[in-house]
Image: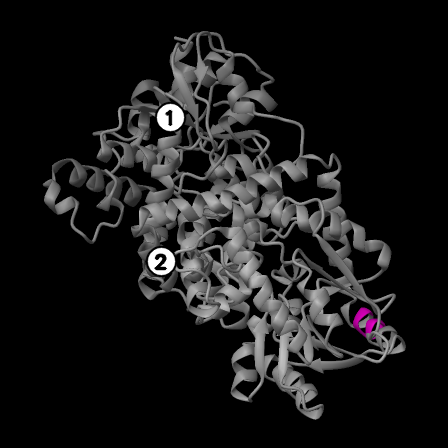
Amino acid sequence: MTDVGLFIPCYVDQCYPEVGLAAVRLLERLNCPVDFPEAQTCCGQPMGNSGSAEAARPLAERYLSIFERYRYVVCPSGSCTAMVRHHYRDLLPSSPLLEAVTQKTYELCEFIVDVLGVARIPGAFPRTVALHQSCHALRELRLASSSERVVPHVDKVRGLLASLDGIRFAPLALKDECCGFGGIFSVEEEAVSCAMGKDRLSDFVHGAADVVTGVDMSCLMHLQGLAARAKTPVRFLHVAEILAGAAA
Amino acid sequence: MTPHAKRAAAYVANTARMHWHDKALWHVREKRDRAAATVPEWEALRTQAAALKAHTLSRLGEYLEAFEANARKLGAEVHWAVDAEEHNRVVLGILKERGLSRLVKSKSMLTEECHLNGFLEKHGVDVIDSDLGERIVQLARETPSHIVLPAIHKKKEEIGELFFQHLKTDKGASDPKYLTEAARGHLRERFLAADAGLTGVNFAIAETGGIVVCTNEGNADLGASLPRVHIASLGVEKLIPKAEDLPVFLRLLARSATGQPVTSYTSHFHGPRPGGELHLVIVDNGRSALLASATHRRALSCIRCGACMNTCPVFRRSGGHSYGATVPGPIGSVLSPSADAKRYAGLPFASSLCGSCTDVCPVKIDLHHQLLVWRQELGEAGLTPLSKRLAARLGSFVLQRPWLYRLVGWLGRAALRRLPRALLYLPLNAWGRQRELPPAPARSFRARFKKALR
């Protein structure tokens, strides 16, 4: 057992196992083996966002007790990490356990840059990549500086990707517009959600992207669903897949 | 479907119009970005503005009393209205007592909130909105679709048609300059004929008893200066402690609203003009209830710049009228449920929770977080659909039992792989209307991770 626990969001576990495996490989290459406690299921965000605090609460409590024993918890999703770090305190009373676990939960790229202190990943990825800034990674975890704020420019995920040889970034008209996924929003407001997604996709296609990437597979699942239906020839890869694959 | 989702779907169905509306508002957002970038201390200003508002709200009673006393010293008459109805009665009373029947208004979202126009018209008062955008929606018998850009939903050709009907402009004319000149001529006559003017208030200064009104068209100044009687309606949240606090807000307001460094007119009124009357109508209308809510109190800091609407990817694509509330967009979805939780229970869900509103807000209201908290409050009050609450409970039951989660996951993936497409993509499946379902691999991450370890 190591002192780093891996938290794999439920939909990644079920639909995108290769993303979780890529995160494991990537961390192992950075000399950071991880432990996967099997009692884990879901952070509770779908219930919390749909307005059912009482359904989300036991899942938040489970998360705390499952990951209490690790020094760090790493998760390949900005949104689930933001749920734990910022929204558990809406569900649970303040406690030392809550503070400790929420503060040691990191999104994967954030963990690599801020905790492991790694700025460069060796490898090559000679493709044109559209980096989709997922909203919770951007505006709740501050993995990059959002376009609304007047602050020094930061972009941790792009920094890691940019260290790969041959990678090019697709220029985007809107640098951090929401893709329209939004969890329950994607079905409750299906029309607006899909309109937002199509606009986002068309920005990526205009930027001549071969690959669309990001830290949240949920945004990519929505965009990929739209692209597949429209037969738009673009690939979708989680950042972990690019970083782990490039280093191979 | 929530009422917003229905109206939004109808708006989105006209793809060309949706994109036109989206671009018009994004253009304003881009202007705002350029204006904000010229102020290196922008983030510090936002922090200061938020702190000033938080402080004022924490002692709102004291500041309101000080404002009332100081405004009276300056010769203004101060009226209090607990709700919209009382506000409307007070305004009508001021007009009736003096035998006045022609009121010219400048922009006031508060009077929209109180539905003042309809009330006064019923009582024989001729009401003219003098803000160009408001005049357009008034002529069209609509409501504003945006708090700063009331007629942003109207194309210039539609305004040309409206003016042709009401102001006798040339048929088919759509040149904005020509139409604006026509409106200007028409409004000038009404200004000269008016016997009372009503304005909103952007800031009320407790220390001085003065009020500040920000406009771009100068219409508030005409409306307040030509007629002898000036009525100014303000919500209790418009208070700021001191005159020296004003620049913090003025530097943020116009830049956030339209990307201008400052509005064309920033008019200060300290008591009535010589020989005139100034009536200040201070309105609560649910604001003190909001003040009592620890979670939603911060929403009272809003300075009505509209930046959250311009940036909101949902607002830009669904149009302001889709919200069915006086104040639409993110701030409206936070404010409206506090006025009528049942009626507006769908609005906190009309958001992808992207958080752009929170980052653009000049007074740092945590808008997207408030929307999330509202969802949970509405859920606890039983105001979200039962089906949604049951689904969440069922999901939670499964997710609390790893064995059951594994089983349900396995069954779900097997179903996705084996069921015929026609069955998977029934109209009931909202996800699948325009999107393919996610992949359903034979084995989950946890199964593969365990095997890799062995």
The colour scheme is one colour
Q: Residue at label 2?
A: B5
What amino acid type should be assigned to the residue bearing mark 2?
A: Ala
Q: Nearer the viewer, residue B188 or B118?
A: B188
Which subunit holds the residue at mark 2? B
Quadrant including the C terminus of chain A: top left
Instruction: Report the side of B419 relative to A51 (left or right).
Output: left
Is residue A58 in view?
Answer: no
Within 10 angstroms of label 2, few (less than 14), some, or many (20 or more) residues? Answer: many
Marks 1 and 2, how far apart at CA: 29 Å
Q: Nearer the viewer, residue B390 or B452?
A: B390
Residue A206 is tagged as 1
| Vertical position of residue B441 compared to residue A241: above or below | below
Q: Nearer the viewer, mark 1 or mark 2?
A: 1
Within 10 angstroms of label 1, few (less than 14), some, or many (20 or more) residues? Answer: few
Image quarter of residue B454: top left
Is residue B151 in view?
Answer: yes
Instruction: Report the side of B411 relative to B34 (left or right).
Output: left
What amino acid type should be assigned to the residue bearing mark 1?
A: His
**Helix, strand or loop status at disc 2:** helix
x, y percent for residue B353: 48, 48
x, y percent for residue B375: 47, 59
Region of the chain picked out in magenta, as a range: B63-67
**Helix, strand or loop status at disc 1:** helix
Q: Are marks 1 and 2 in contact (CB under 8 Å)?
A: no
Main secondary structure along the magenta-highlighted residues: helix
The structure residue drawn at horizontal position 67% and vertical position 58%, both measured from the top left corner, is B303
Check residue B66 for magenta coloring. Answer: yes
The structure residue drawn at horizontal position 71% and vertical position 35%, both measured from the top left corner, is B38
Instruction: Report the side of B371 relative to B454 (left or right).
Output: right
Check residue B133 for magenta coloring. Answer: no
